[in-house]
Structure formats: structure tokens, C-alpha cells
Amino acid sequence: MITPRLNDLVALLRETGIRADIDPRNLQPPCAWVAAKRIPDWTMCQPEITADIVLIAPDNGVPHALDALENMLTSVVDTLATEGHPISDVSLSDTVTLSGIGSPLPAFTIETTI
């Protein structure tokens, strides 16, 4: 129930040209990490899942990171709106440390419902 829906979201992001995966070990920035966050109401037959789309930029300096993150953000927001996935929050001040990359990387996090 959870993994197939996350993989559908990954496929949607890949269609827009964004490298995306549910396994952060497979990511190479600029990219998007898709992760399940919570199920707000388990009583439904097909419960909605709140997921995070963590947009991650390489650490090439703030101006370059912001350009990469803003381009991905625009693309993801447009795609989610077209597909009917509501956005409940966007965090613009996150960092993520990926396996094999020692330092924290600049990130934006989009919370959506799938």
C-alpha cells in the first residue's frame, strides 16, 4: 500500500526530468528523495498518505543551490497541481546528508498527500 504509491510519485517526478528515488542511497544531487511521513486517517479503505519530497541540491554555493532547488520546486509544484496532489507545506531551509556525501546538502521539503 505505501511503497507502490511512493513509487508512483517517484515515476511522476522522473517524468518531469527530476532524478528521484525512495532509497537515498541511490540519489545523486540535484535530485528528489520521496519518503512516507504519516497516515493521518487509517479508518479509510485506501488511506491517504502524507509524503515528503525532499529536493536536494549539490553544495556548489548558495546561488547555484537556490537556482537548482527553485527550478525543481517549480516543476514539482506544477506537476503535483496537475495530478491533484495537494501541497500542505514547503520548507525552504532544510539540509540533508546523503550516504557517501559527508557534508549536509541544501534542500527544500514539500509535504504532499498521495
Image (spheres, helix red, strand yellow):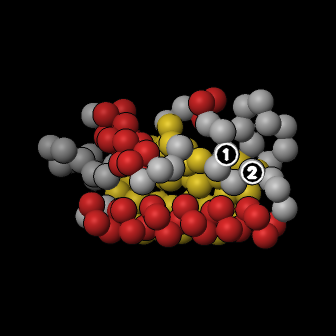
Q: Is residue 24 left or right of residue 35?
A: right
Hey, which residue is sitting farthest left in the picture? 45
Separation of marks 1 and 2 at Cα, in angstroms: 5 Å
Residue on which the image places disc 2: 58
Decide if residue 95 is in sight here.
Answer: no
| Residue at x-position 60% and y-position 69% | 70
Q: Estimate the x, y position of residue 87 in percent, counting from the top left.
A: 40, 67
From the viewer's perspective, is residue 100 above or below residue 91?
Answer: above
What residue appears at the point 31 percent right and 34 percent down from the top-left corner?
4
Residue depicted at 59% across the width and 30% down the height? 26
- Specify which label sits upstream in the sequence, 1 or 2: 1
The residue where tag 1 is placed is: 29
Image position, residue 1 (x, y; %): 27, 34
Q: Is 30 on the left-hand or right-hand side of 9?
A: right
At a point 78% along the width and 70% down the height, the residue shown is 63
Q: State yes or no: discs 1 and 2 in contact (Cβ < 8 Å).
A: yes
